[in-house]
């Protein structure tokens, strides 16, 4: 997938240069990121991981001149007092490197990458390993960094894979990350859910935001009751576009109340009488525990990460 501007090409070359230097970073939760960076010894970056992983300020002299120059060409150098910060992070996943927004992800159009991305990726790879059937077309709804679409494109190089989002910054990151991974069978397209693209799909993926965010940032705010609004909208949209034997794989988070799962109950009602095969499982029983302190979640017991797979019959 070709990158579109000189800055995009410079950012691609920056990521390639880091990869050639053996750069590797696993991105933690925002709370872990905050706590680790708060340590006195972590006030300044001391290596590439500090600059491009932990988003710490750094001295110009820390970086090789070629890396600093590529950052400048890519427009990702941000002044920080007498030092600098990177406007992007780079995270490792399944042997690939992904460019996304720097910490903290405060901007409304921030492109998020974190533990949810890793769990989503694991669910995709497990599905692809367990289901060897033909995938001619696949789509990742709300693609973000493009991680789900890219892993699918690499695992099924004969498939046409679409990555769709309403966030131009996400589509830009996806194009750069696809070029970095050499996922030539992937196309990034602007679409609100599936409204702006045509046809049926053999695999529909989604890892939507599922929290109630007071600032309603696109990468974080799920809307609706306890953040489930977007997940339910994706569910409804996807079922209408599944090809025969096609599967929806939806990774999301669910606020549990009184040991009850309101999202599963709603899904059961919407699937009743439709003759679709489905599987639902918790993949992590407790995520974003800090959200329970206030706001919409004060009466919830926990937030669980779940994976829903729905498959249409061959008929």
Image (cartoon, rainbow, N blue to C red):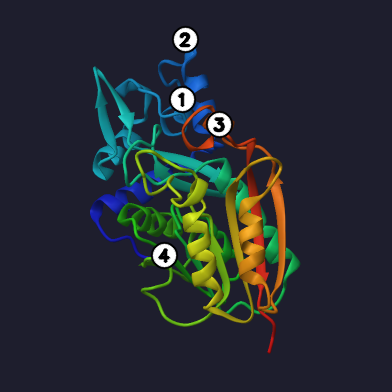
Is 214 positioned to the left or the right of 248 in the image?
Answer: left
Residue 205 is left or right of residue 219, and the answer is: right
Furthest-right residue in view?
A: 130
> How many angstroms separate mark 2 from mark 4 (CA)?
41 Å
The residue positioned 26% from the left and 50% from the top of the image is 7
Horizontal and vertical percent for residue 213?
42, 40
Q: Disc 1 or 2, which lies upstream in sequence?
A: 2
For the residues marked 3 and 1, what is the alpha-carbon distance in whole angstroms? Answer: 35 Å
Which mark is first along the chain, 1 or 3? 1
Image x and y of residue 228, in percent: 52, 52
The reply, left or right, for residue 193 in relation to residue 267 is left
**Image mark for residue 164:** 4
- Asked if disc 1 and disc 2 are in contact, CB closer than 8 Å, the reply is no
- Dot 1 corresponds to which residue? 47
Spatial separation of the CA atoms under disc 3 and disc 2: 28 Å
Q: CA distance from mark 1 to mark 2?
A: 16 Å
Residue for badge 3: 292
Kindly identify which numbered label has been placed on residue 40: 2
Q: Nearer the viewer, mark 2 or mark 4?
A: 4
Q: Residue at x 68, y 77 (%)?
A: 273
Quarter that holds the C terminus: bottom right
Which element is circle 4 on?
strand
Measure the alpha-carbon separation of dots 1 and 4: 34 Å
Q: Mark 3 vs mark 2: which is more N-terminal?
A: 2
N-term mark: 1 or 4: 1
Distance between mark 4 and mark 3 Cα atoms: 31 Å
**Mark 4 packing: few (<14 Cα in 10 Å), some, or many (20+)?**
many
Residue at the (37%, 51%) spot, across then down: 12
Left or right of 291 in this view: 215: left
């Amino acid at each position: 997938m070709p990158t579109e501007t000189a800055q995009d090409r410079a950012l691609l070359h920056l990521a390639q240069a880091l990869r050639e230097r053996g750069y590797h970073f696993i991105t933690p939760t925002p709370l872990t990121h905050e706590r680790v960076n708060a340590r006195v010894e972590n006030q300044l970056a001391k290596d590439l991981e500090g600059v491009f992983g932990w988003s710490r300020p750094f001295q110009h002299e820390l970086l090789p001149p070629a890396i600093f120059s590529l950052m400048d060409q890519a427009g990702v150098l941000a002044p920080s007092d007498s030092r600098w910060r990177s406007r992007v992070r780079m995270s490792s996943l399944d042997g690939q490197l992904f460019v996304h927004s720097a910490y903290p992800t405060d901007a409304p159009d921030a492109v998020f990458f974190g533990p949810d991305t890793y769990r989503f990726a694991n669910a995709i790879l497990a599905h692809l390993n367990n289901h060897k059937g033909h995938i001619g077309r696949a789509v990742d709804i709300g693609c973000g960094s493009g991680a789900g679409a890219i892993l699918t494109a690499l695992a099924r190089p004969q498939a046409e894979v679409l990555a769709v989002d309403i966030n131009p910054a996400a589509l830009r990151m996806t194009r750069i990350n696809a070029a970095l991974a050499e996922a030539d069978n992937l196309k990034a397209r602007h679409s609100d859910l599936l409204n702006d693209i045509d046809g049926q799909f053999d695999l529909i993926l989604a890892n939507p935001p599922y929290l109630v965010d007071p600032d309603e940032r696109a990468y974080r705010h799920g809307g609706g009751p306890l953040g489930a609004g977007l997940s339910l909208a994706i569910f409804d949209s996807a079922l209408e576009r599944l090809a025969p034997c096609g599967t929806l794989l939806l990774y999301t988070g669910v606020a549990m109340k009184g040991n009850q799962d309101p999202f599963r109950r709603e899904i059961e009602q919407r699937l009743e009488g439709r003759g679709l095969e489905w599987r639902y499982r918790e993949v992590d029983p407790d995520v974003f525990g800090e959200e329970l302190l206030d706001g919409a979640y004060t009466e919830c017991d926990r937030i669980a990460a779940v994976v829903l797979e729905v498959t249409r019959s061959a008929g």
